[in-house]
Image (cartoon, rainbow, N blue to C red):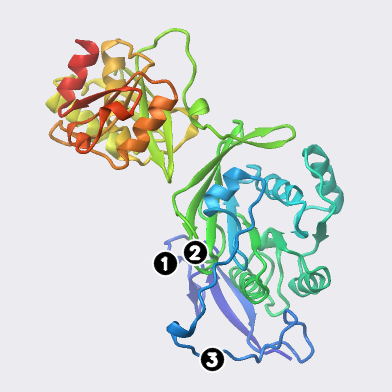
Amino acid sequence: MAKLKSAYFCQSCGYNSPKWLGRCPSCNEWNTIVEELIAKDEPEKGSWRFGKSSKTTSKPRLISEINKTEKYRIITEDAEFNRVLGGGLVPGSLTLVGGEPGIGKSTLMLQLALSLSDYTILYVSGEESEQQIKMRAERLAFSNNRCYVLTETATDVIFKQIELIEPDIVIIDSIQTLVSPLIESGAGSVSQVKECASEVMKYAKESDVPVIMIGHITKDGSLAGPKVLEHMVDTVLQFEGDQFMTYRILRTTKNRFGNASELGIYEMLSNGLRQVSNPSEILISEKNESISGVAIAAMIEGNRPLQIEIQSLVSTANYGTPQRSSNGFDPRRLQMLLAVLEKRGGFRLGTQDVFLNVAGGLKVEDPAIDLAVCVSIVSSYEDLPVSHSICFCAECGLGGEVRPVNRIESRISEAAKLGFEKIFIAKNNTKGLNFEDFNIKIVPVSKLEEVFSELFG
């Protein structure tokens, strides 16, 4: 029989302590330390361990003796999902998908499972019954006769069924609901999540079967459970978006097999999630008349060039300290750009309320949108609209200079493809750039004053 040992874990960050503490010394949260029972011994003889002997030993090999074999990827029917993974599912990989409750994680995974009709899929659910999953599957426009559903939380039972079915892909919804017989604490605790994830990872690596796990998140937006969970998996995906809006963003935060800054965009419909192949269509609103305070920025998210709409509203502050509010843009960077406009541009913004919004609910960190932010603020301040056929792509420095950005060719090509007639870029970005290669007028500038003079006179 396994020996039991008591330990204290922080339910917020996973900090381990030999005694109870009122405040976690790692994350400084109060009343998050709870006692958990841990089983120290290995399971008894005869217990099932992925169909292989647990005593199998590995021998060290010279790196020159290892054969380089390029593993194929499983290409799914979801092009957006393939993009964020770096080209498809890698055999033996472990992927973690996190997101807010009700955002559509289970819908995305079930839709993915039903679309892979050429593979045997095992969908393990610890949160829903078979009837609930069947009701969701009927709403989706896919059918798959090789998709199995298992409603179970015990890992030993799950792995026994995996051995019988021998699936090509395993989807677990969710890792916080699994319970390992090796741990005495309840489901969702730090020790249970860590042990269950370790068993799933061991199965994925030994069987060469890709596993996708859904994970819960905490109230501050981070993945629930110990931080080691994110270190264990190969890929971490974040499913974002407002549950009251129709668009969702699948963002990569970690990827051992591809770019770690990719994103995919979906639209939530009554019959499932629709892939958005051209995100610029939803990030730029169509208008029949020009409105002040709107500018279009040419940005890059991962490997994908996008055109996004920057909206600003500048009004007189009638109550005390002026407000500075931004949605989807760093508030500290907004403060810096406002100081540059007041110091270098001569605009009296110190007594104005400034509100900034990135259309489409996207959170942007690309510095190439600085110029579009400045133009939209000045446009709202002067109440002079900017033409919808113009876009901007440059970073702004503290001296009011317009600085170059990377991958300017792909940004210009995307703007020309979407029908823009003119694009403002930094003068230093024109080195080695042939203007005749692009079906768009390129305007190189070096100072903010040149941009405002060209637009507003």
**Labels 3 and 2: the sequence-earlier one:** 2
The residue tagged 1 is 26
Secondary structure, mark 1, is loop
Residue type pointed to by label 3: Lys
The residue tagged 2 is 13
Query: Where is residue 36 drawn, in percent x and y?
Result: 62, 75
Check the image and report above or below for 52 versus 133.
Answer: below
**Labels 3 and 1: the sequence-earlier one:** 1
Q: Based on the displayed image, in which of its 4 quarters is residue 275 positioned?
A: top right
Name which residue lies at 32% across and 33% down.
369
Could you tell me which quadrant the N terminus lies in? bottom right
User: Is residue 125 among what the camera can see?
Assistant: no
Name which residue lies at 64% across and 78% down.
37
The residue tagged 3 is 59
Q: Give whichever of 327, 315 is nearer the camera.
A: 327
Q: Based on the displayed image, in which of its 4 quarters is residue 162 positioned?
A: bottom right
- Alpha-carbon distance for marks 3 and 2? 36 Å
Whether pointer 2 and pointer 1 mark residues with C-beta atoms closer than 8 Å, the reply is yes
Residue type pointed to by label 2: Cys
Check the image and report above or below for 143 versus 289.
Answer: below
In the picture, measured across the screen, residue 63 lies left or right of residue 204, that is left
Secondary structure, mark 3, is loop
Residue type pointed to by label 1: Ser
Name which residue lies at 23% across and 12% down.
456
Q: Based on the displayed image, in which of its 4 quarters is residue 323 positioned?
A: top left
Check the image and report above or below for 145 versus 377.
Answer: below
Name which residue lies at 29% across and 42% down.
406
Q: Give whichever of 208, 3 is nearer the camera.
A: 208
What is the number of the mark on residue 374? none
Query: Where is residue 390 drawn, in percent x and y?
Result: 34, 19
